[in-house]
Amino acid sequence: MHSKGKLFIISGPSGSGKSTMLAEVFEKIDNRYFSVSATTREPRPGEVDGVNYWFKTREEFKSLLEAGEFLEYAEYAGNYYGTLAEPIIKQLEEGKDIFLDIEVQGALQVRRKIPEAILIFAIPPTFDELERRLRKRCTESESKIRERLDTARREYKEAMKYDYIVVTDKPGEASNEIISIVTAEKCKVSERKYLIGEA
Amino acid sequence: MHSKGKLFIISGPSGSGKSTMLAEVFEKIDNRYFSVSATTREPRPGEVDGVNYWFKTREEFKSLLEAGEFLEYAEYAGNYYGTLAEPIIKQLEEGKDIFLDIEVQGALQVRRKIPEAILIFAIPPTFDELERRLRKRCTESESKIRERLDTARREYKEAMKYDYIVVTDKPGEASNEIISIVTAEKCKVSERKYLIGEA
């Protein structure tokens, strides 16, 4: 029984613990495909081209954009982020599940093109905890932190349009929630109606 | 944060492996409440009143029915089955999740009264496997088995109205699917919007 893969889009503000959570998901499940976004932002220490992001210059990014290669793109904190369409569509057709780690506006753009995409928003248990985590990171100026908190507030409002919220509180909890969501989505009657059609 | 409990209704034809699966679910999760149905059918060997069912005479059942005490009831294979409303409503208000093991017509009746109920249908991987399991049980006549298979076919059609299908194939698989569904349902934005309203 060949069925199409499912597209899971994960968003969460800076400091949400989303990256740690996704690394855990990646360890716990096999045969999933993580899509790598393209971005014009500078790599952070330790980030690898083609693993964390495809790092592009603004000129490279714009030329891909003009060629219609993006499923979504957005400007975020002064940089462009985008998802190349072709590899995603191909993997879904092959029946592979895809995880897409993109910000809120991009997620809503993808849903307009792929309505069956499942949108998951990752947050700490409270907004105060988000602020605490951002400050603890200490790599950014006060004005940058405030900018990130304002962005986070806007994202929280848009998250009402998402399907699920996972909470990055205790270690392992949010990744278990993600894995449960993946399992549950595959149990939906729309996914398994071929099993009851044969009676 | 006090939120209402969720009502999970599990149905599945005779031979679906539903009882084994529910026993596993019961072992794996705490703080859940399994609702016990009332029935006029004869207890099978080993079945205990108040545990497997509340065993009632037809007269007792009809008098409860006339008093409006049932959330749903149905006649099935010549016997009455019903779910008493009051304990369910009370437990949901207290924030407890409830598992209700009832047949298809009853499940759809409950959904009309409690639209947020989540309906899960349990089946073996194929319909042939269902027949094999029914015959292996060897406790019933050929005509009873055929009657059960006809009933199962009708139930499979109604299962299109359910939310989820779980497959009782490998041991532990269906109960894990149920637990994932419970977790995922609790991650839905409608359940957790209070977490994003505070930003």
Image (spheres, coloured by chain):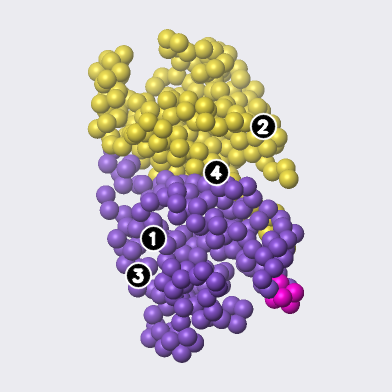
Chain colours: A yellow, B purple
Q: Residue at x 47, y 85 (%)?
A: B57
Question: Residues under labels 4 and 2: Cα distance?
Answer: 19 Å
Farthest residue in the front direction? B45
Please name the amino acid that badge 4 sits on: Thr
Work out whether mark 4 precedes mark 2 in sequence or the reverse, and give the earlier one: 2
Residue A195 painted magenta: no
| Secondary structure category for the residue under label 1 | strand
The span picked out in magenta is B141-145
Identify the residue at image location x=68%, y=53%.
B125
Read off the residue under disc 3. B87
Badge 3 marks a residue whose secondary structure is helix
Depth order, front residue of B177/A198 = B177
Up-down relation of residue A93 to residue B105 (above or below):
above
Mark 1 surroundings within 10 Å by alpha-carbon count, few (fewer than 14), some (14 through 19), many (20 or more): some
x%, y% of residue B91?
33, 64
**Disc ID at residue B33:** 1
What is the quadrant of the N terminus of chain A in the image? top right
